[in-house]
Every structure is written in C-alpha cells, then in structure tokens.
Amino acid sequence: MTVPNWKTERYLLGELPESEMNALKALENERGEFYEQLELLRSSNKELLAKYPAKTRKFAVIEPIKNRWLVPLSACAAVLIAATAMIAVFSGEASLPQNAVVISENGTRIKGLKTGLEIWRKTADSTEKLANNNEARAGDLLQIRYAVPEQCYGVLLSLDGNGVLTIHLSGKQGKAVKLEAGKTISLESAYELDNAPKFETFYLLTANKEFALAPVAENILQGKTPKDVEVTQITLKKR
C-alpha cells in the first residue's frame, strides 16, 4: 500500500483522525513499504535537527503542496509544523506576463520569459491578479504562480506580520526543488490568508544549482537578503 507523503507526515505528527491513525499504525507494524517511508522521513528530520539545532524554538506553518516535511531552521526560527492546505479550483485562464514564453502545440518555445512571481485571488466568479502592495484580508484564497526562463532550482516561501514563515514549494530533505521552465506554473494548492497583521510577503528564491532551504529561510526570518540566490518577491498589505 502506497501512502502519500503528506499523510505520512501528518501520521508522524498525530494529526490524522483516530481511525486513520490506527490503520496506519497497523501498517507500520507490518514493517513493509510504509515502515521504510517513515524511517526515511524520521532520518531526514533528525539530520536537519542535528545540522540546525535550535535553542529558542519558534513555531511556523508549512502549507503542503506535494511534499510536506518538518524543517528545523536555527536559534531564531526553528521547528516548522505541518498543517493542512486548502485545495481550491481557480477558474479562468491567467494572462501570461509580458514577454512570456508560449509553448505551441508542436512544442515550439518562444524566447523572452523572465523570472516572475504572480499572486491571484479567487473572487466570487473569477480570479484577479494582485500587484505588489495591493491590499488583502484574512480569508482571501490565493493561488501562487511562478515562471522561470531556464531550468533551475527554487523554493517558494511567505512571511506574515506575526513572523510566521510558510513554505509553499520545496524539494525533499530540506533542499530546493527543480523548477519547470518555459511557462507559467500554478501551484496545486491554494493558500488562505489568516488574520496575521500588516503584511504577507511572498518569495521566489532561485539558483542555477541545488541549495538548502534552511539557511535562506533563516535569512528571511532575520530580515536579511539570502545570498547566492535570486530573490523575486510580492508583498500584500493586510487590512
């Protein structure tokens, strides 16, 4: 039986309904594929905790897209707790950014796409694109989209007015994920704004080679610009 990564992590956190917890506990006791999956995740988290020990722990939230895992940061930021993402369907076609790459039916790619980050808000019957410094409010349902001109690695994060860091897209074992190049990509899960005050800033961090998530996340929490990565960001003002 194959268990999705997000459910495995929720099982480790004890966040599943009792019936599912019991069923997965029995599956773990069989010491098969699910047991190995759990051991791999436990080992990964243990290695990260050893590499980035936390003296003062601050709790933040991870919103899962495809992969969810705990990311220990450091003395100023430490253990990130997984939470359930809200899945939403955004209707309508989004307009591509200026000079965007367009891939035709025969696979032809038009050059000119630049690294970009887009935030779209679900409305009653459509969606609207939000610009930097636009206003937003608690309960807004957002879709995050990115575009990169060439194959690279990246992560998508956001930081709110309470100092809570949310990971929207990352790779396995605390690394950046390989991003799909040449077109605008929409994340599969929507993100619902909570009642954190003042702002929510979204970050697309990219580099030509794979990089660790924890150091760049720590920089953002400290108000520093991460080194050796390209930073694209959009800030929404909370009202």
Image: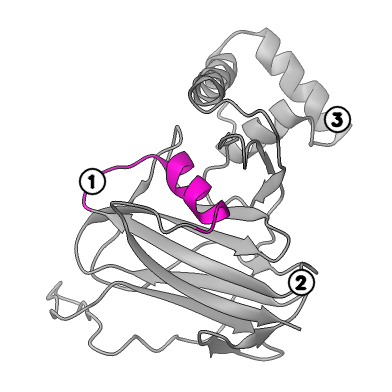
Write down the quadrant of residue 151 in the picture: bottom left
Real-space CA distance between mark 1 and mark 3, rounded to the nearest whole angstrom: 43 Å
Name the quadrant of the C terminus: bottom right
Start and end of the magenta stretch?
A: 208-223
Q: Position of residue 78 (x, y in %)?
A: 63, 37
Front tag of 1 and 3 = 1
Q: Closer to the N terminus: mark 2 or mark 3?
A: 3
Write down the quadrant of residue 185 in the picture: bottom left
Q: Nearer the viewer, residue 139 or 212?
A: 212
Tell which residue pokes out farthest to the right in this image: 18
What residue sits right under mark 3 in the picture? 19
In reply to whether residue 220 is colored magenta, the answer given is yes
What residue sits right under mark 2 in the picture? 197
Write down the quadrant of residue 171 in the picture: top left
Q: Nearer the viewer, residue 122 or 177?
A: 177
Amino acid carrying label 3: it is: Ser
Vertical order, 207 against 58 (above or below)? below
Q: Nearer the viewer, residue 129 or 76?
A: 76
Q: Are marks 2 and 1 in contact (CB under 8 Å)?
A: no
Vertical order, 72 against 223 (above or below)? above
